[in-house]
Amino acid sequence: MSFVKKFLAIYRIDWKMLKRDPMLVYSIVITLILLFVVRYFKDRLGALYLPAAIFCIIFIPLIFGMIPGFMMANEKEEKTIAALQVIPISSEAFLTYRLLWASAVTVILTGLAPKILDIPIPWKGLLALMALFIIEVWTYALLITDFSETRMQALTVSKVAGWLLILPPAIKFIVIARNISTDWSKFTAFLPTYWVYRLFEGIPFNDYGDFWPGLVVHLMWLGTLVWLFRRRVL
């Protein structure tokens, strides 16, 4: 089977599911509304605006990782994902095809978010964020897929994983808002979203030292989840 036919075989399934459940359109609209709402309260938030804006941007890969995660969980429940094994491609190639559109939407919205929020981010910082966000799309989607067998389980897993991944920026926001001397968010350094926040903090000072340890943490999560996907799903 040619590359194009492999690509179309998977995306034909995705397109049918998206037409049945317009979650993608709703998610894009909700994301844009969230960005504009935070931007509207910029003056009222004052010093808390930047943490709030970062908190908002971090939601982008989580929202668009959730959609393919639910789709693959639904396929597991309906046993249709097993039929995809007849397509002669590797698990990694299958995930690339499946998550490519979600990654593309995340990149586009990540590029738009600083303009909507009126946050100056240089291209170097934007590219670094996009690289980590693409991995987070895969991570969140695989968390849902690997640990759920039905759509109901997927909903539960997405909530637990979502709360876990927003924990670092949430704790950081509370530390700043309450002027707490100890930065308790450092205890969440094992989570990928912690390093996204750290990267955000360094961008205004042209400090990208946290990108590389952040990339390592992201890849460790992704590698583990891909391994679980190969053992438990395909």
Image (spheres, helix red, strand yellow):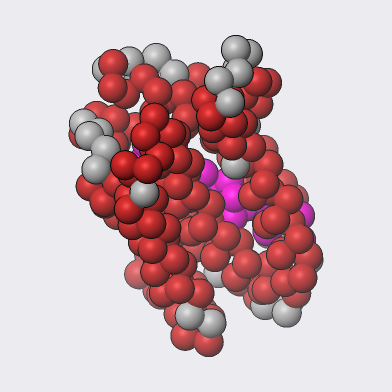
Looking at the picture, does residue 38 appear above or below residue 173? below
Out of 163 and 151, give the one closest to the viewer. 163
Q: In the rendered view of the protein, which quadrant contains the N terminus?
A: bottom left
Report which quarter residue 146 is drawn in: bottom right
Magenta extent? 129-148
- Overall secondary structure of the magenta section: helix
- Residue 110, x across and y down, in percent: 33, 48
Q: Is residue 217 visible?
A: no
- Residue 91, x across and y down, in percent: 58, 54
- Residue at screen point 72% across, 64% down: 154
Q: Is residue 140 magenta?
A: yes
- Residue at screen point 73% across, 79% down: 78
As drawn, which residue projects farthest toward the front? 44
Q: Does the magenta stretch include residue 141?
A: yes
Give the number of marks. Answer: 0
- Residue at screen point 37% across, 43% down: 44
Query: Horizontally, is 27 left or right of 105 in the view?
Result: right
Q: In the rendered view of the protein, which quadrant contains the C terminus?
A: bottom right
- Residue 203, x across and y down, in percent: 31, 23
Out of 225 and 193, give the one closest to the viewer. 193
Looking at the picture, does residue 207 appear above or below residue 228? above
Looking at the picture, does residue 149 appear above or below residue 109? below
Query: Horizontally, is 38 left or right of 114 in the view?
Result: right
- Residue at screen point 54% across, 65% down: 67
Looking at the picture, does residue 125 appear above or below residue 111? above
Report which quarter residue 129 is drawn in: top left
Report which quarter residue 119 is drawn in: top left
- Residue 212, x across and y down, in percent: 44, 20
Query: Horizontally, is 140 left or right of 211 in the view?
Result: right
